[in-house]
Image (spheres, rainbow, N blue to C red):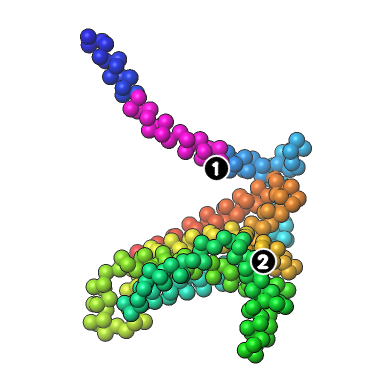
């Protein structure tokens, strides 16, 4: 009897142990096929030249080519310039917007929250198309408004500087509300006693903002800074739809250059090398930001 029961218990134990793995199997297989395999295959591709059956081993040639490629450095410079301007402006506006909506003087907060978040749910391609019409040099509503109030019209897509500003404008419009909602959620967790204590000490609105609000939101600020930096370094949709990388490569980004090499010139080895260079840049910059802001928090 004992010998019969023991195998049954062992089988039941094995079944219970196998159940979690069976439940995880679809997700693991999907991750392996659509995530892990492309990542590994792309890494192997970065050490090859040619495509298809003509692909051959190239060692580090693609990475050496990357260092000597002036167009890659142009794309990286454009991406960095957009990042340096757009991220601080966007997050600053988002923080001010969140503080305003969170004010006790504001009614219908849910309506305001929905209103500021609406641009974030608009498709990136649709956003690009809409702003392409709005910023059209000849018939766009923005230039019409500038002319109506006596200001000079702007050649948004013909001038390199204004083309980059057009990309910054679109990114700011699309993502400011998204970050404002994140900040608003963080503000809900700030104890009101801190503001009351600051008011008792004679702190005005600006002082309460700098001494209470900003320190309390530091983890949320770190999250949005890192997330926005990573997103901007991978920028593709907006400049692709708005400017196509022009004029004269003034809005060419690293992701657009990767796309051109991979799917216009079919140089998948070099495109993979660009992808891994971008991955390294994102990882290093994200780690540095987290380290710096973490030290300030301590």
Mark 2, other Cα within 10 Å: few <14 / some 14–19 / many ≥20? many
Which residue is under mark 1?
A: 35
Q: Nearer the viewer, residue 281 or 64?
A: 281
- Percent coordinates x, y for residue 10 in the rendering: 30, 19
In the shown orientation, is residue 56 left or right of residue 84?
Answer: right
Ranked by sequence position, the earlier of labels 1 and 2 is 1
Residue at (35, 76) in percent of width and height: 107
The range drawn in magenta is 15-34
Position of the N terminus, as image quadrant, is: top left
Q: Distance between the Cα atoms at labels 1 and 2?
A: 30 Å
Q: Nearer the viewer, residue 77 or 182?
A: 182
Residue 198 vs 128, above or below: the answer is below
Mark 1, other Cα within 10 Å: few <14 / some 14–19 / many ≥20? few
Residue at (34, 82) in percent of width and height: 205
In the shown orientation, is residue 23 left or right of residue 135?
Answer: left
Q: Nearer the viewer, residue 180 or 257?
A: 180
Residue 195 vs 238, above or below: the answer is below
Q: Is residue 115 visible?
A: yes
The picture quadrant where one finds residue 75 is: bottom right
The picture quadrant where one finds residue 59 is: top right
Which residue is under mark 2?
A: 242
- Percent coordinates x, y for residue 184 in the rendering: 38, 68
Residue 192 on the magenta segment: no
Q: Is residue 79 visible?
A: no
Tag 2's secondary structure? helix
The picture quadrant where one finds residue 139 is: bottom right
Residue 279 vs 172, above or below: the answer is above
Residue at (49, 60) in percent of width and height: 227
In the shown orientation, is residue 260 left or right of residue 105?
Answer: right
């Amino acid at each position: 009897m004992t010998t019969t029961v023991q195998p049954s218990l062992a089988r039941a134990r094995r079944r219970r142990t196998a159940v979690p793995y069976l439940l995880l199997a679809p997700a693991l297989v999907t991750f392996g096929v659509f995530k892990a395999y492309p990542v590994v295959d792309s890494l192997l591709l970065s050490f090859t030249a040619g495509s298809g059956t003509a692909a051959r081993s190239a060692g580090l040639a693609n990475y050496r080519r990357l260092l000597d490629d002036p167009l890659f450095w142009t794309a990286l410079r454009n991406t960095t310039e957009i990042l340096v301007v757009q991220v601080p402006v966007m997050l600053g506006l988002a923080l001010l917007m969140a503080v305003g909506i969170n004010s006790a003087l504001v009614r219908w907060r849910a309506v305001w929250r929905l209103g500021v978040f609406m641009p974030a749910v608009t498709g990136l391609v649709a956003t690009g198309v809409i702003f392409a019409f709005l910023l059209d040099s000849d018939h766009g509503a923005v230039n019409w408004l500038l002319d109506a109030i006596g200001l000079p019209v702007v050649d948004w897509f013909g001038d390199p500087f204004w083309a980059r500003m057009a990309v910054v404008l679109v990114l700011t419009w699309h993502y400011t509300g998204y970050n404002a909602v994140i900040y608003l959620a963080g503000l809900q967790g700030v104890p009101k006693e801190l503001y009351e204590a600051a008011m008792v000490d004679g702190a005005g609105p600006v002082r309460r903002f700098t001494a209470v609000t900003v320190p309390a939101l530091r983890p949320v600020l770190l999250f949005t800074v890192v997330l926005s930096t990573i997103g901007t370094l991978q920028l593709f949709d907006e400049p692709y739809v708005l400017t196509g990388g022009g004029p004269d490569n003034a809005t060419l980004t690293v992701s657009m250059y990767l796309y051109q090499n991979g799917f216009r010139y079919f140089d998948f080895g070099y495109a993979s090398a660009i992808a891994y260079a971008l991955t390294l840049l994102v990882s290093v910059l994200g780690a540095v930001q987290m380290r710096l802001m973490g030290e300030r928090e301590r």
